[in-house]
Amino acid sequence: MYDLLGYASMLTDGVRLAAYTEALRRAVRPGDVVVDLGAGPGVFALYAARLGAGKVHGVDPTPLVALGRDAARRAGLDGQVEFHQARLEELELPGRADVIVSDLRGVLPLFEGHLSTLMHARDHVLRPGGTLIPAQDRLRVAVGEASEVYRDRVTVWTSQELGLSMEAARRCAANTWCRVKRNEARVVSSAETWSTLDYASLRDVNAAGRVELVVPRPTMGHGLVVWFETTLVPEVEFSTAPDQPEAVYNRAFFPWNEPVELDMGARLSVHLRADLVGRDYVWTWTTDIARPGRAAVRFEQASFFGDVQSPEDVRRAGESYAPDLTEDGAVDRAILVEVDGRRTNGEIARRLREAFPGRFSDHAAALRRVTELTRRLGR
């Protein structure tokens, strides 16, 4: 999730802020129940209350909700706005919401558990006919000319300045996407929508699509630039496209295995796919380039190949591997066994020191270890 600095960056993005506040103005009616997902310090929650919402729930698993509670108290809204430090899926709210607002994206909407949380909110929290903000995100792609980014991230590993050629590192870098600013990647082809996330009907956290791109003039291509366009409510939209004002999200750059010289009229078939594995997406991007009068080029790439794994890492991830606990793991297990809703952190810390007499220098050290774990896994 986001920290306070991240939320501050969101507030400085004038395009985003204007679009979301306008969407709330159009959606919230006096007396409505509103849920702000990923509320953080609660800007949208407090704004919805100012618009006349009868009850607002700000939901966020981080301690930043304490800042929202303080702001609500100072604004005289603490009875109208309630903050919950929890994941929505673990929360029981009284009644259904008329409006749900969220911006749980990263660079792209395919970010951690964003889509599953929105689907849960739609199916279990939003009343029938209620408003979900955003309504839709469209994922766009084009060929990018990004010579400096490519040089600094990919070809740097084959630099001969030190007489070294680290080909394995170059291959990993070429299979790793990155965030880029507007002036770091120039669009040099047509742009197409490869996936549409319609949140009223979405059922899949994964996304895939194939598009055809055309290059209008001779250029160099270094990879694919991906961004999103959003409809928050009807007639309220914004885009993170490279030709739009810089947004807090920036955009994603998926490098090719090598730069390609593209002639006027070059045609590219691009297949993009994102699959949620655990809490992160694994991306694959396949590019077929037809160049008039030149040999065709095909790149098959995946972020999986950008992850550096040793043979030991692969062995330990295998189905037949029998893991054993380290001492750190044994400490965590000892803590979790004691967590039952009755024993206090202090009691658990005392038992922990008894079980691991040489591990903790004093009671305070054991208590820190206990609270670190119970804050993350307890409730």
Image: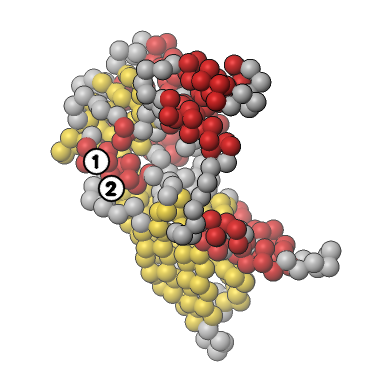
Residue drawn at 48 percent across, 20 percent down: 348
Residue drawn where x is 50% and y is 64% of the image: 302
Q: CA distance from mark 2 to mark 1?
A: 8 Å
Q: Quadrant of the C terminus?
A: top left
Q: Which residue does the image show at 39% across and 44% down from the upper left?
A: 113
Residue 71, position in %: x, y?
Answer: 43, 16
The disc, 2 or 1, on the residue closer to the chain's N-terminal end is: 1
Label drawn at residue 2: none
The answer to which of 330 and 129 lies nearer the viewer is 330
Horizontal side of 351 relative to 163 (left or right) equals: left
Q: How many marks?
A: 2
- Residue lying farthest to the bottom in this orientation: 293
Q: Is residue 87 left or right of residue 31?
A: right
Q: Which residue is mark 2?
A: 199
Asked if marks 2 and 1 touch (Cβ < 8 Å), the reply is yes
Label 1 environment density (alpha carbons within 10 Å; few <14, some 14–19, many ≥20): many
Q: Residue type at mark 1?
A: Arg
Where does label 1 land, which residue?
A: 122
Q: Is residue 219 visible?
A: yes
Residue 96 position in % (x across, y down)? 19, 30
Question: Between residues 178 and 318, which one lies in front from this camera angle?
Answer: 318
Whether residue 216 can be seen here: no
Q: Nearer the viewer, residue 33 or 263?
A: 33
Name above or below for residue 173 compared with residue 22: below
